[in-house]
Amino acid sequence: MNSTALNAARRTAELSALADGEALDVLVIGGGITGVGIALDAASRGLRVALVEKHDLAFGTSRWSSKLVHGGLRYLATGNVGIARRSAIERGILMTRNAPHLVHAMPQLVPLLPSMNHTKRALVRAGFLAGDALRMLAGTPASALPRSRRVSAQRVVQMAPTVRRDGLAGGLLAYDGQLIDDARLVVAVARTAAQHGARILTYVAASEATDTSVRLTDQRSGESFDVSAGAVINAAGVWAGEIDGSLKLRPSRGTHLVFDAAAFGNPVAALTIPIPGELNRFVFAMPEQLGRVYLGLTDEDAPGPIPDVPEPSSAEIAFLLETVNTALGSALGPEDVIGSYAGLRPLIDTGEGRTADVSRDHAVFESPSGALSVVGGKLTEYRYMAEDVLNRAIDLRRLRAGQCRTRNLPLIGAPANPGADVPPLPGLPESLVARYGAEAPNVLAAASCERPADPVAEGVDVTRAEFQYAVTHEGALDVGDILDRRTRIGLVARDRERAVGVAQEFID
């Protein structure tokens, strides 16, 4: 069995091993980016580790982000130099070492329109220069992340064709990191953890967590059993309170709208629009895979029970459209929106202020039952968060482990990862390489289905081979796993309907 391949057969074998009392050093609860990051860190240090997730990989917040690997500029503006510097360092690690195939430089373009006064322009320019300084401080080369600069009005229109033309005095251009997709990063980290010996088990719920034991329930069979581990780490994100009732979280909802890229003239830069009345907050219209533009982002209190799939509010949709229209030549309306999504940030409850002002730092808590919980934080810093909580677990539980290796560990699909066992093939679709990196040839080579290179639906650049690979190598167990997380076809209902029959072909 390929050591990186996650599939139903491997899941069955590994669940049986745990039920039979296999010894574990670390059990991780939660299959989002933080959980899989912990599993990879633990396995690469030589620890025996299992990760359990009650739904699918990247089911929660980790698939609802802006797909940005932030350099921390916003935190610099609020005086949080520590988190800004860490974000810039972690961005550089992802772009140059861990996942150069999944993270690339995204141009961020601020159009200089009459509505933007000289003070605001100066602040944005100063912020971009500070971002350049952060990039240099982090050691990220300009070849990976170009320097900021001012560009002409003509160049602004070339990069963002639907921008408002009247009074346009050029633009300010900076660069940040952008993921081809956040859920793909989670899957790559999970499979790399499996490559190092971690057991990655989806559709397995955890309950009754203590310092050294957890009750696990297979969501597919209904069977339950207890497991023991040297340390139990709760990385369940906004659901962390279900594992440790003493945690106080304040979820904040971030909403994005999905457009056909043609509605923005097929832009090549993220149109970056200052939010009126805010010093350091922007709305972004970002070009994405599958010919789409994502428009975000909001920051709203989300009290009450945690839904499995959060829904955008009508007020958030109106706010995003209203803000983006301040920078467009012709207004977009609700009829232009082809999809939407919302995610909940697992912020630590400080008891006061707007959620937009609550710290994005993370924290590690030891619950009264003894389990360790990691909450807060940002996707960009997942590797650092994993290292931090694992160091704490190793110290507290006296685990025998090597030093952290993840800073220089290439993920599955990175050219330096030994898992790319098929030589590069000429003429591979660009979209396939963008999503799989050095592993792209293997997606086609491993396909046994009919017409593997055919698209799953007309006008959707996802191949039948990718659907099969999701099942045979990436742990997809049902149609939703394929359409909504391994690929992002499900973000647009009409595309999902056209592809669902093909996805069903690959589910036993």
Image: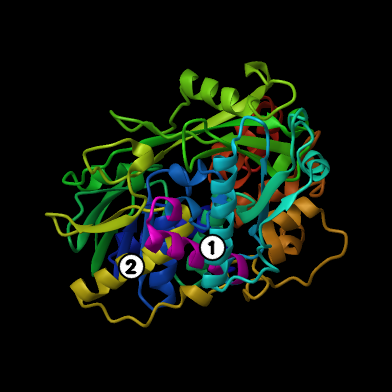
The image's mark for residue 91 is 1
Which of label 2 and label 1 is nearer to you?
1
Image quarter hosting the N terminus: bottom right
Residue 271, by quadrant, is top right
Residue 9 appears left or right of 327: left
- Residue type highlighted by circle 2: Asp
Left or right: where does residue 476 sit relative to residue 114? Answer: left
Main SS of the magenta part reads: helix
Magenta stretch: includes residue 425 = no
Looking at the rendered structure, the secondary structure element under dot 2 is helix
Q: Nearer the viewer, residue 483 or 157?
A: 157
Q: CA distance from mark 2 to mark 1?
A: 17 Å
Q: Residues within 10 Å of mark 2 (few under 14, many from 20)?
A: some
Residue 128, percent across and down? 58, 54
Task: Give the residue displayed 63% in from the left and 44% down from the top.
Answer: 487
Q: Nearer the viewer, residue 423 or 397?
A: 397
Q: Looking at this view, is 240 or 508 the one in front?
A: 240
Q: Which mark identifies residue 388? A: 2
Q: Which residue type does callout 1 highlight? A: Arg
